[in-house]
Amino acid sequence: MNEPAFRRARSAQAKQAREEAILDAARALGRLRGVRDVTLTDIAAEVGMHKSALLRYFETREQIFLELTAEGWRQWSAELRGDLEGRTQATPAEVAAVVARSLAARPMFCDLLAQAPLNLERNVSIESVRCFKLVTLDEVGLIGAEFRRLLGLTESQCIDTISTATGMAGALWQMASPGPRLRELYTSDPRLGHAVVEVEPRLTRVLTALLTGLGATSATRA
């Protein structure tokens, strides 16, 4: 896009269009390079704006990516619940597989899940953090309702399961995406083979163990 297309927005509709263009640019760059390596200058250049002009729409680079993290939560939750809602019953292993598969299919969301607590939440306004946390709270509640229905988990067990799934997805994605130099090292030295991680099977095993244990506890209490 050229510079004239990004004159200052004069209406709410124009402002929204600018914000969407900025989010689109950040999303594309994040997928290409990884969130950590994308700067505010990179995003501004992608949309044909000066960095100072971009700051009229978002307070920091971190706010842009925190918005994308909230978007990722909504999209992942909708997809996951769409699968679970179509089931009248499911085993812990089946639910674990669905959760792991849905997260592994969203690599940028996994990247954002790792970045959010490390830095995205630390360089934005308190109100931005509040809005983000309320989005995640809503989606956790919706996903938890399906876990309770299918597996009989308590509310706290649902929260623990979702926290484990998203936290590990973020960490495992970072391990699975070490960059070309480190990947070459890991694959060239048999002693470092454990460092080469596949997100979906590892996450499936961990969540299966967790849900099986929580299900056994619930059954005992019942």
Image (cartoon, rainbow, N blue to C red):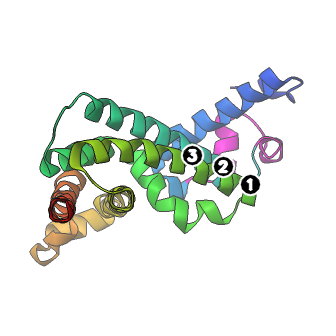
* Residue 127: numbered disc: 1
* Chain part drawn in magenta: 38-57
Q: Quadrant of the N terminus?
A: top right
Precedes in sequence: disc 3 or disc 1: 1
* Circle 2/circle 3 CB separation < 8 Å: yes
User: Which residue is denoted by mark 2 in the rendering?
Assistant: 131
Residue 130 versus residue 50: which sits nearer the camera?
A: 130
What amino acid is found at the position of numbered circle 3 in the picture?
Answer: Val
Can see residue 2?
Answer: no
What amino acid is found at the position of numbered circle 1 in the picture?
Answer: Glu
Marks 3 and 1, Cα distance to the nearest angstrom? 12 Å
Marks 1 and 2, Cα distance to the nearest angstrom? 6 Å
Crowdedness near tag 2: few (<14), some (14–19) or many (≥20) residues, C-alpha within 10 Å: some
Residue name at image x 21 percent, y 51 percent: 200
Q: Secondary structure at mark 2?
A: helix
Magenta stretch: includes residue 42:
yes
